[in-house]
Amino acid sequence: PWIGVNLIGNWPDSASQWIWNTSGAPTAAPTNVTVRLQAQYYNGSGANQAATIWAGIDNSGTVYVNNAAVLTVPSWTPASTANVTLSPGWNLITLHGVNAGAAENPAGAVFSMYVSGAVVLRSGSGWTYY
């Protein structure tokens, strides 16, 4: 998937980046283990905030907001989407992904979150892997 997010036909955010927990993931990542990727978003509005999330995970996974599962991602294409509610203050966004297969192969996750039509969080180098 690492060629570009435009590979996902309906992906709206060309600035988001494919991420994973190993540097070799674009060509060969371990299979059948769960990889966890995290980022935080600060909602400074003082009230709950509606957001739309987009995710693609090769091969599959789940998106969590504040430790609650909000989206199951069955494949990296087409993109999966969900409407979520962000709490006031810090919100923890976590992607759990699994690269499937009998042998190492490319793996990755891509993510974008929109509030009022603007991207407020996207996958990239600022995400933590654990």
Image: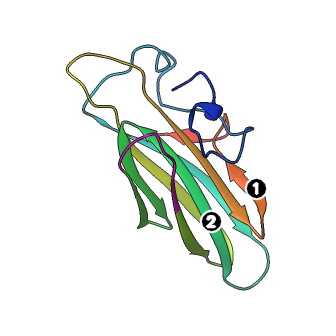
Q: Nearer the viewer, residue 78 or 50?
A: 78
**Magenta stretch mostly in which secondary structure?**
loop
Q: Quadrant of residue 2?
A: top right
Give the answer, above or below, for where 7 lies relative to 75: above
Tell whether 24 sits left or right of 75: right
Q: Nearer the viewer, residue 8 or 86?
A: 8
The disc, 1 or 2, on the residue closer to the chain's N-terminal end is 2
Numbered disc 2: secondary structure: strand
Q: Given the current orientation, which residue lies at the most extreme bottom position? A: 47
Q: Residue at x 56, y 71 (%)?
A: 83
Q: Given the current orientation, which residue lies at the most extreme left position? A: 102
Q: Residue at x 40, y 15 (%)?
A: 28
Q: Amino acid at mark 2?
A: Thr
Residue position for label 2: 52
Tell whether 36 sits left or right of 81: left
Counting from the top left corner in percent of width and height, residue 107 is at: 43, 27
Residue position for label 1: 119
Counting from the top left corner in percent of width and height, residue 23 is at: 52, 18
Tell whether 16 sits left or right of 117: left
Q: Quadrant of residue 126?
A: top right
Q: Amino acid at mark 1?
A: Val
Per the image, is 36 magenta?
Answer: no
In space, the residues marked 1 and 2 are separated at their CA atoms by 9 Å
Counting from the top left corner in percent of width and height, residue 55 is at: 53, 49
Give me the disc on residue 94: none
For label 1, the crowd category at 10 Å Cα-Cα, with few meaning under 14, some 14 to 19 and many 20 or more, is some
Q: What span is in magenta? A: 74-81
Tell whether 70 sits left or right of 10: left
Give the answer, above or below, for where 4 lies relative to 103: below
Numbered disc 1: secondary structure: strand
